[in-house]
Image (spheres, rainbow, N blue to C red):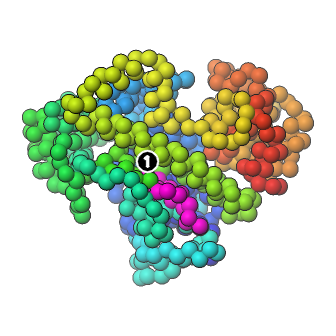
Amino acid sequence: MDAPVIVVGAGPAGLMLAGELRLAGVAVVVLERLERRTGESRGLGFTTRTLETFDQRGILARFGEIERSTLGHFGGLPLDFGVLDGACQAAKTVPQSVTETHLEEWATGLGADIRRGHEVLSVHDDGEGVDVGVRGPDGTHTLRASWLVGCDGGRSTVRKAAGFDFPGTAATMEMFLADIKGIELKPRMIGETLPGGMVMVGPLPGGTTRIVVCERGTPPQRREAPPSFDEVAAAWQRLTGEDISAAEPVWVSAFGDAARQVTEYRRGRVLLAGDAAHIHLPAGGQGMNTGIQDAFNLGWKLASVVQERAPLSLLDTYHTERHAVGRRLLMNTRAQGLLFLSGAEVQPLRDSLKELMVYEDVARHLAAMVTGLEISYEVGKGSHPLLGRRMPHLELTGADGPVSSTELLRPARGVLLDLADNPRLRQRAAAWAERVDTVTARPRGASAADVPHDTTALLIRPDGYVAWAAPGSHHDLPMALDRWFGTP
C-alpha cells in the first residue's frame, strides 16, 4: 500500500478530510490535478456550523478577525439568524482561496502528503484495496490504497470511474459570477429581483466587488472556458441599465442550477464527499460548507475503520447521515432558486412566504436549515433534546480550571462529559480510555443554559454530535461507546 487513504481533490472538503485523518494518526495522500491553488475567491464565508467546526479543531484562530453577521436570506427574502438560540452568526466575506490556504497549512502541518500536478486517470476497486492510475510530473503510475475518497468536485473523475449513479435534474439556465475592481455599484447583498432576472452585489476584501447576474431565459451552455467579461457586462446592462464594461475583471465564472446527488456515498472501498456527491444552485454558499461537514463526519469514522478499531458498519453511518443532509440541501436550494430566479408568476409565493417569515417559528426553522444547525442524526432512542444534535459551546470548570466543550474536541477524539462527578460512570467508560477522553467538570456561565439543568453526562462524538446523554438515552453507556468507538 502506498497509503491507507488516498484523497482526490485539494479543495476545502479534501483538505478538511486530510487534516481529520492526520489528527487520528492515519497517513493520507492527497492528489490534486492543479499545480498550484487558483487564488480564486469562489465560495464565500462560512455557515454557523462551519464556524463551530473550525473552532472545535482550533482552525478558526488562523483566520484572524472575521466579519460576522446575523443577516441572511432565504430565496432573496431577508432572514435574521439572530432568531436562533445564541444569536448565531455567519462569516460573510472570507474568499475560498483564503479558506484553502489555511486548511492546507493545517493539514500539511499535521503531516498530510499533498501532491499537486497529479491527475487521476482510472480507479479500480478489487475488494481488498483501490488502484488509482495517476498522471504526474514524472509520467503515469499507479498508487494503491486501502480506501479512496473523491473530493474532486462536481465533475468528479472518481465518481465517474467508480460507477456511482448521479441522478437529478439538468441545468435550465446559466448565471454569471464576477469579481471586479474599479467601479462602484450600490450594494445588493441578498440580491435584487428585476423584470428580466436577478442581480447581486457584495463587497470583498481588497476593494473587490462580487457580482452575480441571472438573466431569465438564458439557456445553459457546456463551456470549456469561463465566459468573457463582455458577456457579463452586457447581461448586467440589459437587466439594470448600468454600464460596468469599464470595470477590471479579477475572476469570471458561469454556473447553472443543476441539482444532482449520488445514490450512495460509499461503493466498496470508494467514498465521495462535497461536490463530488452533490451539486446544486449555490444559494447562500451552502455547497462548500456542506462539503466541509461531509469531511468532518467521515474523517474520524474512516480513521477508526483503517485502524481496525471499528467495524465497516461505522462507515455505513456516513452514507445514512450525510445523504439525508445532502437531500435536504438540494431541496432548500431548489426552493430558493424558484423563489429568487423565477418571474412575476412566483411573486404571490414570495409574498406569502414573506408573511410567514414574520413568525419566529418559521424564521427559526429556515435559519436553522441554511446554517446547518437543524441537523440531527439517529444515535439511538431517548428523550434528551441534545441526542443526535450538535454539542453547543459549553463553558466548564474542571479539575484543572476553566475549559470548554469546544476545546475538549480539538484532539478529534470522543469526549465523555461527567457533569455529576460520578465514579461509576467513569469506571464503566474506562475500557475506552484510548479512544474517548473522560472529563469531570461542571457547567458555568451563560452557556450552561444550552444544556438541560438535570443533565449528568454527555457522550460527544469527535465531530461534535451528542451520541448519548444521561438522563434520557434508552441505550446504556457501554452500548453507545461500543457503537461509535468499537469494542475495546
The magenta segment: 262-278
Query: How far from the left and from the top, in percent, is residue 331?
Result: 42, 41
Q: Residue at x 62, y 74 (%)?
A: 127
Residue 270 vertical position relative to residue 177 in the rendered view, above or below: below
Residue indicated by mark 1 = 288
> In the image, is residue 73 above or below residue 253?
above
Q: Residue at x 30, y 33 (%)?
A: 339
10 Å neighbourhood of mark 1: few (<14), some, or many (≥20)?
many
Question: Would you say residue 429 is visible in this rendering?
Answer: yes
Residue 283 position within the rendered picture, expressed as x and y whole percent measured from the top left: 36, 40
Say what secondary structure mark 1 lies in. helix
Question: Which quadrant is the N terminus positioned in?
Answer: bottom right
Task: Determine the image quadrant of residue 455.
Answer: top right
If the image is split into quadrants, where does the C terminus sit? bottom right
Q: Amino acid at mark 1?
A: Met
Give above or below for 199 relative to 150.
above
- Residue at the image position 13 percent from the left and 44 percent from the top: 235
